[in-house]
Amino acid sequence: METINWYPGHMKKTRELIRDNLKLVDLVVEVIDARIPVSSRNPIIDELIGNKPRIIALNKSDLADPKENEKWASHFNNKETRALAMNCMSGSGINGLFEALEKEQERILAEKRKLTEENQTDNAVAATGDGAIRATRRNKPLRMMIVGVPNVGKSSLINRMTGKKSTQTGDRPGVTKGKQWLTLKNGMQLLDTPGILWPKFEDPDVGLNLAFCGSIKDEILDIADLGLALIKVLQEKYPQLLTERYNLEQVSEAPLDTMESIALKRGFILPGKRIDYDRCARTVIDEFRAGKLGKITLERF
């Protein structure tokens, strides 16, 4: 399959939006796909965010291997970053996210109070004018930015956090179009941004993983080739799930043979007894994305 390149104009604008608004927020919530924890992390976001405090939401963890979720969460956790396994569709993990945000808010407020105390002097200016300005800033609610590649579940997460359908969602990339400031019930504020990919995938597997999980529009891809590539990965990493789902005796050494076996089992046959490769590919891709094949992590720690 050819290397996937994808960088429409709105993603360039999103990069500029993140860069220009980063100074307005206290922390960043980065949403990634738990099935592809490496491929769904945009290196441009790392470059833009720098040392800004961050919480990583391992979304769609219900579709991923539970043992791998634990390993990846442990891997990402460090002094500056907190990682949480979540399912934004059901709301699983939302309470843990709010707890992490509240702790971060307490830490930031404590730092600002300390800075204010250190900067205060005995003169009247510090106690009134300048001091009053600092007190106002100190009491501002926590502001966060939600970032991530397309179709990782940012809008679903925001709808859960606000308790209402605040942003449009869809099982396809590119639904969120522009910048949105939203206020949570606890007074915190968040900035939603459209999904952002990067100009070129140096590792072709990254492009494939994003395509498998729906972060790249299917319309620009050859579905038969993508389905065959997914079958190849699955028969290497989860052969038993393939045999169980499609009632196969075993997976073949050649992915194309496995694909044809699946097509025959499901009756995907065109006139003239020809295999309907497109329909077979679409079925495998859709069932993988929906979790019907089982709990699968394509990138194991």
Image (cartoon, helix red, strand yellow):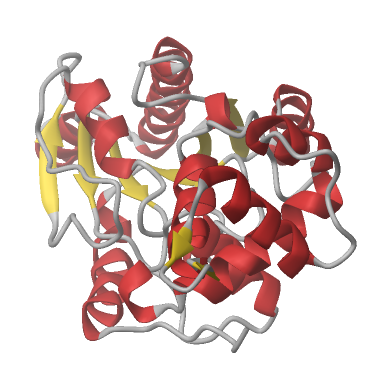
Between residues 43 and 190, which one lies in front from this camera angle? 43
* Residue at the image point whose x is 22% and y is 78% from the top: 13
Res 217 visible: no
Residue at left 53%, top 31%? Answer: 292
Give coordinates of residue 272: x percent, y percent: 47, 74
Q: Is residue 49 above or below residue 106?
A: below
Q: Nearer the viewer, residue 196 or 280?
A: 280
What residue do we see at 83% from left, 49% from top?
Answer: 251
Q: Residue furthest right?
A: 253
Of residues 243 and 25, the one drawn nearer to the viewer in this rendering: 243
- Measured as percent of width and height from the top left, residue 162 is found at 17, 23
Q: Which residue, as the protein is rendered here, is positioned at the far front?
A: 272
Query: Residue 227 sits in which quadrant?
Result: bottom right
Image-based side of 27 in relation to 256, left or right: left
Percent position of residue 56, x then y: 53, 39
Q: Position of residue 121 (x, y in %)?
A: 33, 35
Corner quadrant of residue 109: top left
